[in-house]
Image (cartoon, grey):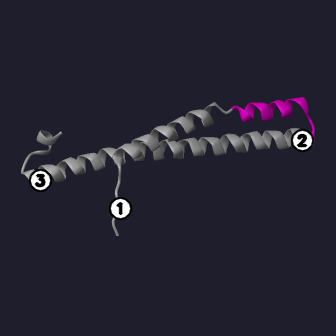
Amino acid sequence: MDFEVIADDLDVAAQRLDEAVDQVRAAAYPAAIRGIAAALSGSASAAAARSCATSFTTSKTAWLSAAEGHSSAMTESATAYRQADEAAVASLWGLEAAEVG
């Protein structure tokens, strides 16, 4: 089974994921949900809204951490593929990898 990795595509995917991270980070749903809790102070809905806001914040934090890690891993992979390609070319030509790049 053959496959091809295009390092530039990995970089583009990482950049797009970083853009999504920025958008999710900017999402202010917990603040809006807490506003509902304040408006309905003392009600069952207020407690549910606070719980929902906390759950959203926890999930958002976990997703952001995972997405940032994945973006970083894609960038590191692209770099590793490029370095491996350069080393392979260098070994075919009997050169040092630094002479190729």
Question: Which residue is denoted by mark 1 in the rendering?
Answer: 3
Mark 2 or 1: in front is: 1
Residue density around tag 3, few if under 14, some if 14–19, many if 20 or more, within 10 Å: few
Q: CA distance from mark 2 to mark 3?
A: 68 Å
Picture disc at residue 91: 3
Mark 2 or 3: in front is: 3
Query: Residue 79 at x, y = what percent?
Result: 31, 44
Question: Which residue is denoted by mark 2 in the rendering?
Answer: 45
Mark 1 or 3: in front is: 1
The magenta segment is 28-43
Label whose residue precedes the other's in the sequence (2 or 3): 2
Q: Residue at x 93, y 39 (%)?
A: 43
Q: Nearer the viewer, residue 58 or 70?
A: 70
Q: Is residue 37 magenta?
A: yes
Q: Nearer the viewer, residue 7 or 59?
A: 7
Q: Secondary structure at mark 1?
A: loop
Q: Is residue 4 magenta?
A: no
Amino acid type at mark 3: Ser
Residue density around tag 1, few if under 14, some if 14–19, many if 20 or more, within 10 Å: few
Amino acid type at mark 1: Phe
| Extreme residue in the bottom direction | 1
Amino acid type at mark 2: Ser
Q: Nearer the viewer, residue 79 or 12?
A: 12
Determine whether label 2 and label 1 are within 8 Å by CB: no
